[in-house]
């Protein structure tokens, strides 16, 4: 059990050091998956008297699945951001066209 706790502490320490720059969604997913996998793996491993091996296997599985999920979420965030940008551009164009219509109405009244 001590090696499992040491492993979790090492992973958390690495996570704190790695946070000097903002993490991407993929990196956050990988980190969460690693810690979660290590915890679950350690618990399962302790049931069969191999907590360190269980934590290591769980961390590896969690890292892979967390990175995949984080990558997918990051792609969705990028798509949402692109759509938001397009909506803002469309709103600006719509406003420009409304102003142009008002100018044309003004000109018509002056004739």
Image: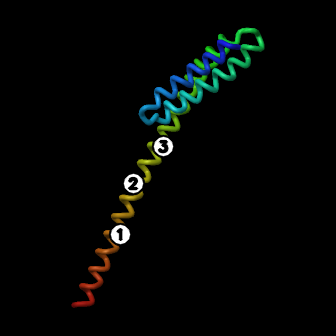
**Residue pictured at 52% horizontal, 38% vertical:** 73
Chosen colour scheme: rainbow
Q: Mark 2 and mark 1: span between their CA atoms? A: 14 Å
Label 3 or label 2, whichever lies nearer to me, is 3
Place of residue 6 in the rendered image (x, y in percent of width and height, measured from the top left):
62, 16
Left or right placement of residue 45 versus residue 9 in this view: right
Q: Which mark is residue 86?
A: 2
Q: Quadrant of the N terminus?
A: top right
Q: Which residue is mark 3?
A: 77
Q: Are marks 3 and 2 in contact (CB under 8 Å)?
A: no
Distance, label 1 to label 3, CA atoms, is 27 Å
Q: Earlier in the sequence, mark 3 or mark 2?
A: 3
Residue furthest right in the image: 47
- The dot on residue 95 is 1
Residues under labels 3 and 2: Cα distance? 14 Å
Residue 9 versus residue 58: which sits nearer the camera? 9
Q: Residue at x 64, y 26 (%)?
A: 36
């Amino acid at each position: 059990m001590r090696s499992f706790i040491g492993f979790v502490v090492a992973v958390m320490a690495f996570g704190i050091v790695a946070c000097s720059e903002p993490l991407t969604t993929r990196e956050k997913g990988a980190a969460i998956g690693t810690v979660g996998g290590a915890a679950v793996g350690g618990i399962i491993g302790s049931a069969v008297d191999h907590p360190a091996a269980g934590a290591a296997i769980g961390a590896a599985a969690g890292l892979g699945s967390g990175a995949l999920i984080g990558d997918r979420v990051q792609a969705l965030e990028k798509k949402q951001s692109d759509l938001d940008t397009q909506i803002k551009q469309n709103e600006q164009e719509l406003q420009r066209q409304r102003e142009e219509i008002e100018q044309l109405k003004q000109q018509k009244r002056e004739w």
